[in-house]
Image (spheres, helix red, strand yellow):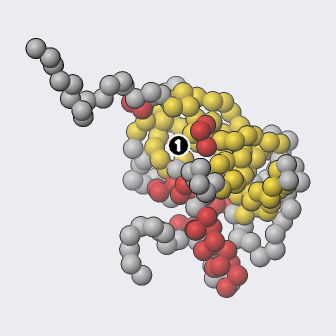
């Protein structure tokens, strides 16, 4: 008598994922390594006139123009003060059809951690220094937490273009009061 395998039963337990950790304002953040293309030393960033404070400028990465986002400013804080440990993490977003490459400015890059899915908690409903939709989860590491960023929300090109448009119109930019793009609210 043959036994049938249940189709909804997982064959293998979810594998731990790897995350690149970095610091901003002394807090530990992480992005999945699958989205990280490379890490480069903070170098010549060309400023672009009339951009919002969160867009630091552009860099020439082997002939390609790559926008550089200042995460501290994106999270509503002061722009990053560049030190010798400041890095630009090059992030690749999107699928194989349409790939967007962006750089993010971080205070320091720490390490690559492997975090099992069972060690990831849901984002907090309140109390975080950044918008809730920017947080994918909270990774438990060594008795503390690492904030796992939702790269697609943080680096949303649609939202960054809205910020750019608001800055061109002279409207005040409060990152906490930004409209939620793609939230399903008709307007």
Please give left or right for residue 168 compared with residue 146 in the image: right
Q: Quadrant of residue 20?
A: top right
Please give left or right for residue 89 compared with residue 129 in the image: right
From the top left corner, tell me how far across and down residue 106 is, in percent: 71, 47
From the top left corner, tell me how far across and down residue 117 is, in percent: 42, 32
Q: How many marks?
A: 1
Name the residue rendered at 43%, 36% in the picture.
120
Q: Residue furthest top?
A: 1
128 up-or-down from 113: above or below: below
In this rendered view, identify the residue nearer to me: 158 or 74: 158
From the top left corner, tell me how far across and down residue 32 is, in percent: 57, 39
Q: Quadrant of residue 13?
A: top left
| Mark 1, other Cα within 10 Å: few <14 / some 14–19 / many ≥20 | many
Name the residue rendered at 67%, 48% in the picture.
91
Q: Quadrant of residue 130?
A: bottom right
Q: Where the N terminus falls, by quadrant? A: top left
Q: Residue furthest bottom?
A: 169
Name the residue rendered at 38%, 70% in the picture.
184
Q: Where the C terminus falls, by quadrant? A: bottom left
Determine whether the residue tagged by mark 1 lies in a helix, strand or loop: strand
- Which residue, given by chain and number where applicable, does mark 1 sit on? 148
34 up-or-down from 67: above or below: above
Name the residue rendered at 81%, 74% in the picture.
49
Residue 122 appears anywhere in the view: yes
């Amino acid at each position: 008598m043959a036994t049938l395998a249940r189709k909804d039963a997982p064959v293998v337990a979810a594998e731990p994922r790897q995350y690149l950790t970095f610091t901003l304002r002394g807090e530990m953040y992480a992005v999945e390594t699958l989205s990280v293309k490379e890490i480069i030393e903070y170098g010549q960033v060309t400023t672009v006139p009339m951009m919002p404070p969160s867009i630091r400028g552009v860099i020439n990465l082997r002939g390609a123009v790559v926008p550089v986002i200042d995460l501290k400013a994106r999270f509503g804080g002061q722009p990053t003060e560049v030190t010798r440990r400041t890095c630009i993490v090059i992030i690749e977003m999107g699928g194989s059809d349409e790939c967007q490459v962006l750089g993010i400015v971080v205070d320091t890059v720490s390490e690559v951690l492997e975090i099992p899915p069972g060690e990831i908690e849901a984002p907090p409903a309140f109390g975080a220094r950044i918008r809730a939709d920017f947080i994918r989860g909270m990774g438990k590491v060594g008795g503390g937490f690492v904030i796992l960023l939702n790269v697609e929300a943080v680096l949303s090109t649609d939202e960054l273009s809205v910020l750019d448009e608001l800055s061109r119109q002279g409207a005040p930019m409060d990152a906490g009061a930004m409209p939620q793009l793609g939230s399903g609210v008709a307007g």
